[in-house]
Amino acid sequence: MYSTSDLRKGLKIEIDGQPYVITDFQFVKPGKGQALYRCKMKNIMTGTGLERTYRSTEKVGKPDLMQKDMAYSYPEGDHFVFMDDVTYEQVTVDVDVIGDLKYFLTEEMPCKVLFFNDTPIDVELPVFVEKIIEETEPGVRGDTATNVMKPAKIDNGFEIQVPLFINQGDLVRIDTRTGEYTDRVNKK
């Protein structure tokens, strides 16, 4: 159990059997009476928001969370299989947990899998991945004065916006947190 003095932004807590992460935190000391802790939280599993106010004497639940370093192995229908590098234990993660991150997975990619009560609830990929542009329109020569973007597809069909100078076959770096192009990687 956490005491309310332990509350801070980014802390993971448990409310009604569900894991939450504190997204905003405010300490309020009224003129008289007990200090109050106002928290905005997001459910880690569903993404729904919640606001709660705690008195300084209350206790808050500590969730049974565990994060493991794993490597992505292969897709299996609507699931993705990850393997623990140490124990070689395989874990199946549902497509709903991964979401659009599935477009950035590559074989043997190191990932962090978050478990709640031994159930995978979140997957964290490396911040940047490198992918080859499979399909894009050729850029118009001389149209580089403005920051104009064009659509491009990577090897699995995911569409991103890239600058006009990017061509088919170029290797680009993509931010997995936003799904956006960051820069072109020079081939050596």
Image: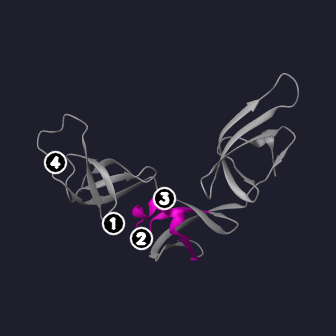
Q: Is residue 49 above or below residue 27?
A: below
Kind of residue at disc 1: Asn
Give the residues in magenta: 88-114
Along the line of sight, which residue is nearer the eye, 73 or 136? Answer: 136
Image quarter of the C terminus: bottom left
Tag shown at residue 139: 4
Q: In terms of sequence position, does the residue under pointer 3 or pointer 4 come before the other?
A: 3
**Label 2 to label 1, Cα distance in Å?**
13 Å
Is residue 93 shown in magenta?
yes
Kind of residue at disc 4: Gly
Q: Is residue 56 above or below residue 160?
A: above
Residue pictured at 61% horizontal, 57% vertical:
46
Is residue 188 shown in magenta?
no
Residue pictured at 11% horizontal, 43% vertical:
141
Give residue 142's quadrant in the image: top left
Secondary structure of the residue carrying tag 1 is loop
Q: In terms of sequence position, does the residue under pointer 1 or pointer 4 come before the other?
A: 4
Tag shown at residue 156: 1
Image spot of residue 30 (x, y percent): 81, 25
Kind of residue at disc 2: Glu
**Label 3 to label 1, Cα distance in Å?**
17 Å
Query: Dot 4: within a 10 Å radius of its alpha carbon, few (fewer than 14), some, or many (20 or more) residues?
Result: some
Along the line of sight, which residue is nearer the eye, 68 or 27? Answer: 27
The residue labelled by disc 3 is 125
**Label 3 to label 4, Cα distance in Å?**
31 Å
Q: In terms of sequence position, does the residue under pointer 2 or pointer 3 come before the other?
A: 2
Residue pictured at 31% horizontal, 47% vertical:
183
Tag shown at residue 107: 2
Kind of residue at disc 3: Leu
Image spot of residue 175 (x, y percent): 41, 51
